[in-house]
Image (cartoon, grey):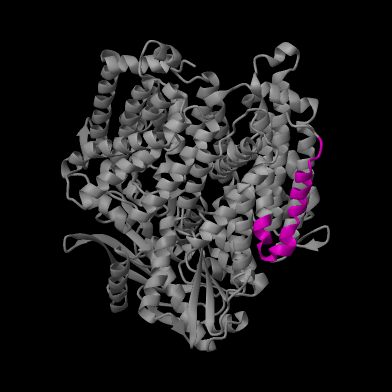
Amino acid sequence: MKTTWLAAALGAAALAAALPLHAQGTVRIGLVLTLSGQFADAGNQLDNGIKTYMKQHGDSVAGKKIEIIRKDTGGPAPDVAKRLSQELVVRDKVDILAGYVLTPNAMAAGDVSAEAKKFMVVMNAATSIVITKSPYMIRTSVVLPQVMETFGTWAATKGGLKQNYTMVTDYGPGHDAEAAFQTGFKGAGGTIVGSVRFPVANPDFSAFVQRAKDLAPQSIYIFIPGGAQPAALGKAFAERGIDLNKTKVLGSGETTAEAALKSMGDTALGIITAWHYDYKLDNKLNQAFVKEFYAMHGRNPDFFSIGGYDGMHAIYETLKKTKGNTDAEAMIAAAKGLKWDSPRGPMGIDPETRDVVQDVYIRRVQKVGGELVNVPFDRVPQVKDPAGERRKKQKS
Amino acid sequence: MANANVKPLEVVFWLATLLPFVVTPNYLSLASQIAITALFALSLDLILGYAGIVSLGHAAFFGVGAYTAGLIAKHYWTEPLSGLLAAGVASGVLGYALSHIVVRFRHLALIMLTLGLGLLVHEAANSASALTGGADGLQGFRVPAVVGFKFDLYGTTAYAYALAVLFSCFLISRRIIHSPFGLALRGIRENATRMPAIGAPSRAHLRKVYTIAAVMAGIAGALLTHTTSTVSLETLSFGRSADVLVILILGGAGRLYGGIVGAIIYMVARDQFSGINPQYWYFWIGLLLVAVVMFLPNGILGGLAKFSRPRS
Amino acid sequence: MLASLAGVLFDGFAYGMLLFLLSVGLTVTLGMMNFVNLAHCSFAMVGGYATVTLMNKAGWPFLATLPMAFIAAGLLSIFLERTLYRRLYRASDLDQCLLTIGIVFISVAAFAWFFTSEQQSAPVPEYLRGSVQILGQSFATYRIFLIAVSLAITAVLVLLLERTRFGARVRAAVDNQRMARGLGIDVERTFMITFALGGGLAGLGGALAIQMVGLDPSFALAYLVYVLIVVAVGGLGSIGGSFAAAVLLGISDMAGKYYFPWLGAFLIYLVMVALLMWRPLGLFGKR
C-alpha cells in the first residue's frame, strides 16, 4: 500500500540521516532562522550577511573548516525552534548554535544552549532579557533599549524636545521600544503627551497618521517592524502631509529603511532616527561590505545582514582565540570582552553581560546626490544595554 | 458503517508507535510534536468528520489549553498531570460557551464565525500581554518532569508522555464514536433536518461534542507547553487552525485515524522538506497536497479505502 | 473634527474598494460553482508581480501595466481551471480546500524563488502621488484614483451582468445551476469565462494594492482572511453584497483605528461576527 511504502522510505531516510558524520577538523554551526513565511526576508538577509562574510574571509578558521546547517522555524514558533535546536545538538552534533531572528525562538533555544552547554550567538533577536537565558550566549545584533532609551535621552537633551507622542506596534518589541523611549525621554526631563498602539497586521496607517496630525504634538516617536510596514507608513505620511516644521518625527531605524524611503519620497526629508546600522555608512569596511553583498545578492544589506555578518566575525575571532577548541566554557571566556571594527563602526561583546556594545547613530533624512539618505549627525559611542545594566545592579 | 471490534491492523499500528524509541531515538522530539498534533487533529475530527462542523478557529482551544498549563506552571505548581486536567477544563468551558453560538449556523457562515471567534481569542491574548507575555511568549516557567521522569534533551520523556495521553484520548474518542451518541452525530452530519424528526435533539448533541473536542484540543495544547516549556501566541493563531484542518483533510476526515495519519505524513514531510530546502519547502508540501487530492480523494485513508475495497 | 471624519470615511472607502476588487471574483465563482478557491489571492499576487516586473525590468509606465496584470492573472486562472480545478467540481468542499491550499503554497514558494522575499515597490507616476486639498482636508491622490478605477469597474460589471446575454447566463447559473443547464446554457464555458474574469480582477487588485499595502510572496496568505470575510459578509454570488461588505469593513477598520485605536484589530472581527450572526447568508446572499 502506498502509505506503507512512503512511511518505510521516510523511515529509512531518517535512519540514514541519524548517523552523524563529524569529520575531525570541522566546526559545525547550527543556524536557526525564519526562512519562510512572514519573516522570511529578515532570515534571508541575515543569511546573506553570513554568506558575504564567509566569501570575504574564507570558510576555515584556526585550522578547522566551518560547516553550516540551516534550519527554518517558519516564523515565531518557540516549540519548533526549541526542537530544531535540540536536534541540531543531539542529532547533527553541532558545536555552536546561531541565528534566531525572533525573540520567542531565541528564548526557547537559550534553554537548549544552557542545558547542552553549547556556545550560542544570537544574531537578531533584540529583546533585552534574551541574553539571560544561557551563560554561553552572546549577541551581535542590537538590544532595543540600547538604542531606544538612548534616543529618548538624546531627544530630551541635545534634541531640545519637551513633548512627545509615541506610536508603536502592539506587540513585544513595540512595547519594549515604547517603554525604553519613554524611560529615556522622561528621565531626561521630557513629557509624554500621549501614546497609541497599532495592531500588528496593519496594512494602512492613514488613520493613525491623521490622529497624530490632529493632535499636533511637538514631536512624535514611531516604532514599527520591518517588512511591508515602513513603506506603508511612508505612504501614509506622504498622503497626509505632516508638517515637519510643526511636528518633529522621530523614528526607529526601520521607519527610514531603504524601501520606506523609496515610497515616502521627499516627504521623508527631516525625519530623525536612531539606529546602529545603515548601508550608506561612510567607512571603508562598510563600503567593501556593501559592494561584496550587492555583487553576491543583487540588493543592499540591512541591519539583519550586519547582525549575521558580525555574528560570524565573533565566531571566527573566538575560534582563533581558543585555537579551534569548541568547548562552551572556553568559547564564552574567549568571546567576553571581544572588540572589533565592523562595517557598523566599533563594537564589542560586554565581558559581564555578554551582550553587544556599539555606537548609536542619530541620523536625519537628507538629499545627498539626488538620493534620500540617512545622514548621521550625532553619535552616542559604545552604548551598553541600560536594561541589562539595571539588572546587574539589582543582582548586586 | 465501521464496527466497534478491534481490528488487528489497529493493534499493529499502536505497537508501531513504540518503534521510534528503538529505531529513531534521535527523532523523539519530532515524534512528541507529531503525537500532540495528532491529538489536536483527532479533536477536530470529532466535530468535523463526525458532526460536520467545519472549524477554522479550533486553535483557540489548543492555545487556551497551552496558556492555562503555562500559567499554572508559572504561578502555582509545575506538576503536569493536574495541569493537563486544568487545561482541559479551561478550554472546555470556553468550548461550551462558544458552542451556543457555533451550533446555530451552517455552511460558510459557520466557517467564518469559527474563524472570527478564533481571531478574537488570539487578539485578546495579544492585548493581555501583561498576563500572557504577548508576542514574546510566556516566559519565566519551566516544567521539569512528569511522574518523576525528567524532560530530557532527546525528547524521550516528552514522546512517552504525549503518546500515553494521545492513546488515552484516542480510546475515549473511539468509545464516543461507536456509542449511540456517536451514531446520532453521524446522523446529524448526513441530514440535519431529519434528525429531530426521529427524536434525536441536534443542537444539544452538537454542543456536547463541540465541548468534548474543545477539552481534547486544550489537553493537546497543554501537552505542548509541558514538553517544550514554552507557550506563544502561535498556539492561538489562524496558521495553527489552518494547519490542523489541512492535516485532517489530508489524512481523511471521519475515519478516526485520519488525523493521526495526516499528522504523521504532513509533519514528517515538512520536517524532511524543510531540512533539505529550508527556504522553499512550501513548494514540495504544496505539491504533496495537490498530489494527494488528485490521486486519493477524501484524504489518504479515504483513497486507500477506495483501493482496498473489493470491486463487486 | 468633521473634516477628519470625512478623511476617515474617504480612506476607509478607498481601502474597501481595494478589498472589493480582490474579492468580487471569488464571490461570483463561489456562488456559481460552489468551488472553494482559496488560491484566489495567488491570482492577485500574479497581477502584482506582473506590474512590478514590467515596470522595473521593462520600464513600462504604471498605467500600461494594469491591463497586463489583469490579463496575466486571467490567463493563469484559465490554465488552472482547465488542468486542475475542473476535475474537482464534484469533489467535496474539503478536497477543494486542500487542492487550492496546495496551490497557494506552491505559488508562495515559486514567487519567493523568482523574486526573493524582498518587499516590492511599484513607484507610481508623479501625478498619482501626494494629495489634493479640499476644504482644508487632504485627500490622497492615489486613493482618489483607486476609487475612480473601482467604481468604473463596478459599473462595467453591473452592465455586463444586467445588460448582456453573457451576464444573463451568469446570473442564471448562480441562481440555479441545474435549471440553467436544463435551459441549454453551457454552464462549464460560462464558468470558465467568469473564473478568468474573477481571477483577472484579482490580479488588477493586486497590482493596484502595491502602492497602498506593498507586495511580497506572503501576500497570497495574508489577504486570504480579509477576502473570505468580505465574501461571507456580502453573500455568495452577490456583487452588490461584496461591494457593500467591502465598504463596510474598510470604513469600520479605518474608523476603528482612528476613534478607538485600543480596539485595534478587534473591530473588524467583531463586525464580521456580529454581521454573520445577524445575517448568516450575508448581507445580500440568497442561500
Q: Specify whether residue C4 is in view.
A: no
Looking at the rendered image, the quarter that the C terminus of chain A falls into is: bottom right
Q: Quadrant of residue C73?
A: top left
Q: Is residue A296 above or below residue B145?
A: below
Image location (x, y in percent) of residue A122: 51, 68
The residue at the point 43 percent across, 24 percent down is C33
Q: Is residue C236 left or right of residue B312?
A: left
The residue at the point 55 percent across, 54 percent down is B270
Along the line of sight, the residue nearer the viewer: A2 or B224: A2
Image location (x, y in percent) of residue A376: 29, 67
Along the line of sight, the residue nearer the viewer: A90 or A384: A90
Residue at the farthest right position? B147
Q: Quadrant of residue B310?
A: top right
Along the line of sight, the residue nearer the viewer: B114 or A220: B114
The residue at the point 51 percent across, 84 percent down is A319
Point out the stretch of residues depicted in magenta.
Answer: B5-31
Image location (x, y in percent) of residue B107: 55, 24
Image location (x, y in percent) of residue B163: 75, 52
Q: Is residue B201 left or right of residue A204?
A: right
Q: Specify whether residue C29 is in view.
A: yes
Residue at the farthest front position? B312
C190 within the magenta span: no
B30 within the magenta span: yes
The residue at the point 74 percent across, 13 percent down is B198
Magenta-drawn stretch, dominant element (helix, strand or loop): helix
